[in-house]
Image (tube, helix red, strand yellow):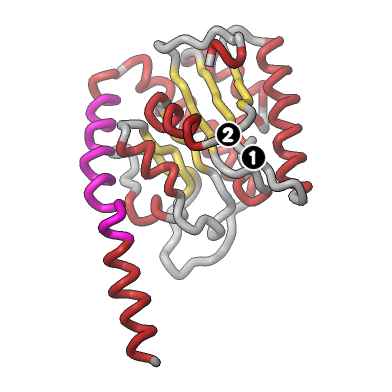
Protein backbone atom coordinates (compact mmCIF):
# COMPACT_ATOMS: atom_id res chain seq x y z
CA UNK A 1 0.00 0.00 0.00
CA UNK A 2 2.69 2.44 0.98
CA UNK A 3 4.77 1.75 -2.13
CA UNK A 4 1.75 2.31 -4.36
CA UNK A 5 0.12 5.28 -2.65
CA UNK A 6 2.53 7.01 -0.28
CA UNK A 7 -0.32 7.31 2.24
CA UNK A 8 1.69 5.71 5.05
CA UNK A 9 -0.81 3.03 5.96
CA UNK A 10 -0.18 1.41 9.35
CA UNK A 11 -0.50 -2.32 10.01
CA UNK A 12 -2.00 -1.65 13.44
CA UNK A 13 -4.89 0.41 12.09
CA UNK A 14 -8.27 -1.08 11.22
CA UNK A 15 -8.20 -1.76 7.49
CA UNK A 16 -11.45 -2.14 5.54
CA UNK A 17 -11.34 -3.29 1.92
CA UNK A 18 -13.91 -2.94 -0.85
CA UNK A 19 -12.44 -4.86 -3.77
CA UNK A 20 -14.71 -5.95 -6.60
CA UNK A 21 -16.01 -5.00 -10.02
CA UNK A 22 -17.09 -1.35 -10.21
CA UNK A 23 -20.72 -1.20 -11.23
CA UNK A 24 -23.84 0.59 -10.03
CA UNK A 25 -25.60 -2.12 -8.03
CA UNK A 26 -22.48 -2.98 -6.02
CA UNK A 27 -22.39 0.51 -4.49
CA UNK A 28 -18.60 0.28 -4.07
CA UNK A 29 -18.28 3.79 -2.63
CA UNK A 30 -21.05 3.59 -0.01
CA UNK A 31 -18.59 3.82 2.89
CA UNK A 32 -17.51 7.22 1.50
CA UNK A 33 -21.06 8.52 1.02
CA UNK A 34 -20.94 10.58 4.24
CA UNK A 35 -17.31 11.69 4.73
CA UNK A 36 -18.10 13.81 7.80
CA UNK A 37 -19.72 10.89 9.57
CA UNK A 38 -16.80 8.61 8.72
CA UNK A 39 -14.37 11.20 10.09
CA UNK A 40 -16.42 11.52 13.25
CA UNK A 41 -16.44 7.76 13.80
CA UNK A 42 -12.66 7.62 13.41
CA UNK A 43 -12.15 10.58 15.76
CA UNK A 44 -14.38 9.11 18.45
CA UNK A 45 -13.71 5.37 18.10
CA UNK A 46 -10.35 4.86 16.38
CA UNK A 47 -8.49 5.42 13.12
CA UNK A 48 -9.76 3.77 9.94
CA UNK A 49 -8.01 2.83 6.70
CA UNK A 50 -10.14 2.12 3.62
CA UNK A 51 -8.96 0.40 0.46
CA UNK A 52 -11.11 0.55 -2.67
CA UNK A 53 -10.04 -1.50 -5.66
CA UNK A 54 -11.85 -2.53 -8.81
CA UNK A 55 -12.36 -1.96 -12.51
CA UNK A 56 -15.34 -0.60 -14.42
CA UNK A 57 -16.28 -1.86 -17.86
CA UNK A 58 -15.48 0.77 -20.51
CA UNK A 59 -19.18 1.00 -21.42
CA UNK A 60 -20.43 1.10 -17.82
CA UNK A 61 -20.91 4.81 -17.26
CA UNK A 62 -22.37 4.27 -13.79
CA UNK A 63 -19.35 2.20 -12.79
CA UNK A 64 -16.92 4.77 -14.16
CA UNK A 65 -18.79 7.54 -12.38
CA UNK A 66 -18.63 5.60 -9.12
CA UNK A 67 -14.87 5.18 -9.51
CA UNK A 68 -14.41 8.91 -10.18
CA UNK A 69 -16.54 9.73 -7.14
CA UNK A 70 -14.47 7.40 -4.96
CA UNK A 71 -11.25 9.07 -6.11
CA UNK A 72 -12.62 12.55 -5.39
CA UNK A 73 -13.94 11.65 -1.95
CA UNK A 74 -10.70 9.83 -1.10
CA UNK A 75 -8.71 12.97 -1.95
CA UNK A 76 -10.97 15.08 0.26
CA UNK A 77 -10.69 12.69 3.21
CA UNK A 78 -6.92 12.31 2.89
CA UNK A 79 -6.49 16.09 2.88
CA UNK A 80 -8.96 16.76 5.66
CA UNK A 81 -8.23 14.10 8.28
CA UNK A 82 -5.30 12.24 9.75
CA UNK A 83 -7.66 9.66 11.25
CA UNK A 84 -9.13 8.40 7.98
CA UNK A 85 -6.99 7.26 5.07
CA UNK A 86 -8.51 6.11 1.80
CA UNK A 87 -6.64 4.47 -1.06
CA UNK A 88 -8.19 3.84 -4.47
CA UNK A 89 -5.98 1.28 -6.19
CA UNK A 90 -5.56 1.06 -9.95
CA UNK A 91 -5.10 -2.04 -12.11
CA UNK A 92 -6.98 -4.42 -9.82
CA UNK A 93 -5.94 -7.97 -10.69
CA UNK A 94 -5.56 -11.46 -9.19
CA UNK A 95 -2.22 -10.70 -7.56
CA UNK A 96 -3.59 -7.61 -5.85
CA UNK A 97 -6.69 -9.54 -4.79
CA UNK A 98 -4.54 -12.19 -3.11
CA UNK A 99 -2.86 -9.54 -0.97
CA UNK A 100 -6.12 -7.80 -0.09
CA UNK A 101 -8.06 -10.90 1.01
CA UNK A 102 -5.10 -11.91 3.18
CA UNK A 103 -4.23 -8.49 4.58
CA UNK A 104 -7.59 -6.87 5.33
CA UNK A 105 -9.26 -6.81 8.74
CA UNK A 106 -12.77 -6.29 7.35
CA UNK A 107 -14.19 -7.23 3.95
CA UNK A 108 -17.00 -4.84 3.04
CA UNK A 109 -19.73 -5.93 0.63
CA UNK A 110 -22.83 -3.77 0.18
CA UNK A 111 -24.60 -4.45 -3.14
CA UNK A 112 -28.27 -3.75 -3.72
CA UNK A 113 -30.26 -6.79 -2.71
CA UNK A 114 -31.16 -9.16 -4.37
CA UNK A 115 -28.60 -8.69 -7.16
CA UNK A 116 -25.56 -10.41 -5.63
CA UNK A 117 -25.07 -13.77 -7.38
CA UNK A 118 -22.67 -15.10 -4.75
CA UNK A 119 -19.82 -12.90 -3.52
CA UNK A 120 -16.80 -15.18 -3.75
CA UNK A 121 -14.29 -12.50 -2.71
CA UNK A 122 -15.87 -12.44 0.75
CA UNK A 123 -15.54 -16.20 1.01
CA UNK A 124 -11.83 -15.98 0.18
CA UNK A 125 -11.36 -13.17 2.71
CA UNK A 126 -13.13 -15.21 5.39
CA UNK A 127 -10.84 -18.18 4.77
CA UNK A 128 -7.93 -15.80 5.45
CA UNK A 129 -9.43 -14.68 8.76
CA UNK A 130 -10.92 -11.38 7.61
CA UNK A 131 -14.35 -10.54 9.03
CA UNK A 132 -17.15 -9.94 6.54
CA UNK A 133 -19.35 -6.87 6.83
CA UNK A 134 -22.03 -7.48 4.24
CA UNK A 135 -25.63 -7.00 3.22
CA UNK A 136 -27.68 -10.18 3.53
CA UNK A 137 -27.49 -11.33 -0.05
CA UNK A 138 -25.55 -13.97 -1.99
CA UNK A 139 -23.67 -16.44 0.17
CA UNK A 140 -23.81 -14.17 3.26
CA UNK A 141 -27.58 -14.71 3.52
CA UNK A 142 -26.81 -18.38 4.15
CA UNK A 143 -23.47 -18.20 5.95
CA UNK A 144 -23.46 -14.96 7.93
CA UNK A 145 -23.95 -15.21 11.70
CA UNK A 146 -24.38 -11.75 13.22
CA UNK A 147 -21.64 -10.90 15.70
CA UNK A 148 -20.16 -14.40 15.42
CA UNK A 149 -18.34 -14.58 12.08
CA UNK A 150 -19.00 -11.03 10.90
CA UNK A 151 -21.74 -8.41 10.67
CA UNK A 152 -24.74 -7.82 8.46
CA UNK A 153 -25.89 -4.56 6.89
CA UNK A 154 -29.61 -3.84 6.87
CA UNK A 155 -32.36 -6.32 7.60
CA UNK A 156 -32.05 -10.05 7.00
CA UNK A 157 -34.77 -10.99 4.49
CA UNK A 158 -36.47 -14.31 3.88
CA UNK A 159 -35.19 -16.36 0.96
CA UNK A 160 -38.21 -15.51 -1.21
CA UNK A 161 -38.08 -11.80 -0.40
CA UNK A 162 -36.86 -10.07 -3.56
CA UNK A 163 -37.50 -6.52 -2.41
CA UNK A 164 -34.48 -4.28 -2.72
CA UNK A 165 -33.06 -2.02 -0.01
CA UNK A 166 -33.12 1.73 0.30
CA UNK A 167 -29.60 3.09 -0.20
CA UNK A 168 -29.84 5.63 2.61
CA UNK A 169 -31.06 3.04 5.13
CA UNK A 170 -28.23 0.65 4.28
CA UNK A 171 -25.63 3.41 4.50
CA UNK A 172 -26.99 4.49 7.87
CA UNK A 173 -26.80 0.91 9.20
CA UNK A 174 -23.27 0.56 7.83
CA UNK A 175 -22.08 3.66 9.69
CA UNK A 176 -23.99 2.75 12.86
CA UNK A 177 -22.44 -0.70 13.15
CA UNK A 178 -19.04 0.65 12.22
CA UNK A 179 -19.28 3.12 15.11
CA UNK A 180 -20.97 0.90 17.69
CA UNK A 181 -19.49 -2.54 17.01
CA UNK A 182 -16.73 -2.91 14.44
CA UNK A 183 -14.29 -0.12 15.35
CA UNK A 184 -14.74 -0.38 19.16
CA UNK A 185 -14.18 -4.13 19.10
CA UNK A 186 -11.06 -3.87 16.94
CA UNK A 187 -9.38 -1.44 19.31
CA UNK A 188 -10.99 -2.45 22.59
CA UNK A 189 -11.50 -6.21 22.54
CA UNK A 190 -8.88 -7.96 20.43
CA UNK A 191 -9.57 -11.28 22.16
CA UNK A 192 -13.12 -11.31 20.86
CA UNK A 193 -11.97 -10.02 17.45
CA UNK A 194 -9.56 -12.91 17.00
CA UNK A 195 -12.20 -15.31 18.28
CA UNK A 196 -14.54 -14.11 15.54
CA UNK A 197 -11.71 -14.41 13.03
CA UNK A 198 -11.13 -18.06 13.92
CA UNK A 199 -14.88 -18.69 13.87
CA UNK A 200 -15.06 -17.11 10.42
CA UNK A 201 -12.49 -19.60 9.11
CA UNK A 202 -14.17 -22.54 10.86
CA UNK A 203 -17.74 -21.80 9.76
CA UNK A 204 -17.20 -20.52 6.23
CA UNK A 205 -14.28 -22.57 4.88
CA UNK A 206 -15.92 -26.01 5.24
CA UNK A 207 -19.27 -24.83 3.85
CA UNK A 208 -18.36 -22.61 0.90
CA UNK A 209 -15.67 -24.19 -1.27
CA UNK A 210 -15.11 -25.79 -4.66
CA UNK A 211 -16.31 -29.20 -3.40
CA UNK A 212 -19.64 -27.65 -2.44
CA UNK A 213 -19.82 -25.86 -5.78
CA UNK A 214 -19.28 -29.03 -7.81
CA UNK A 215 -21.73 -31.01 -5.66
CA UNK A 216 -24.43 -28.36 -6.04
CA UNK A 217 -23.96 -28.22 -9.80
CA UNK A 218 -24.19 -32.02 -10.08
CA UNK A 219 -27.17 -32.52 -7.76
CA UNK A 220 -29.14 -29.34 -8.38
CA UNK A 221 -28.46 -28.54 -12.03
CA UNK A 222 -26.94 -31.29 -14.16
CA UNK A 223 -29.02 -34.14 -12.76
CA UNK A 224 -32.23 -32.14 -13.30
CA UNK A 225 -31.24 -31.24 -16.85
CA UNK A 226 -30.45 -34.87 -17.57
CA UNK A 227 -33.76 -36.03 -16.10
CA UNK A 228 -35.76 -33.45 -18.05
CA UNK A 229 -34.02 -34.35 -21.31
- The region drawn magenta spans 193-213
User: Residue 124: image x %, image y %?
Assistant: 37, 41
Q: Which residue does the numbered mark 2 point to in the structure image?
A: 92
Q: How many angstroms separate mark 2 from mark 1 (CA)?
A: 6 Å
Taking the spot 48% from the left edge, 29% from the top edge, the residue there is 178
**Magenta residues, dominant SS class:** helix
- The quadrant the C terminus occupies is bottom left
Q: Secondary structure at mark 2?
A: loop
Residue 176 falls within the magenta-colored stretch: no
Q: Position of residue 17 (x, y in %)?
A: 50, 30
Residue 55, numbered label? 1
Foreground: 199 or 174?
199
Of residues 107 and 93, the one nearer the viewer is: 93
Residue 42 at x, y percent in the picture: 53, 16
Residue 227 picture location, percent across and down: 33, 90
Asked if residue 204 lies in the magenta stretch, the reply is yes
Residue at horizontal 42 percent and vertical 42 percent from the top: 122
Tag 2 near tag 1, CB within 8 Å: yes
The residue under the point 23% across, 32% down is: 198
Q: Determine the image quadrant of residue 76.
A: top right
Eyeballing the image, is 155 above or below 84?
below
Amino acid sequence: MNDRTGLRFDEGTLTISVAKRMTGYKRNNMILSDPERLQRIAAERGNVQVIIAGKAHPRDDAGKGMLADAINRADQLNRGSQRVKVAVLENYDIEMAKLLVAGSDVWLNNPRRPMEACGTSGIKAAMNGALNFSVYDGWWLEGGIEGVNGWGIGRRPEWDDLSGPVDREDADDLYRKLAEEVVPMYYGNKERWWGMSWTSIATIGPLFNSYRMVEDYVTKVYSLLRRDS
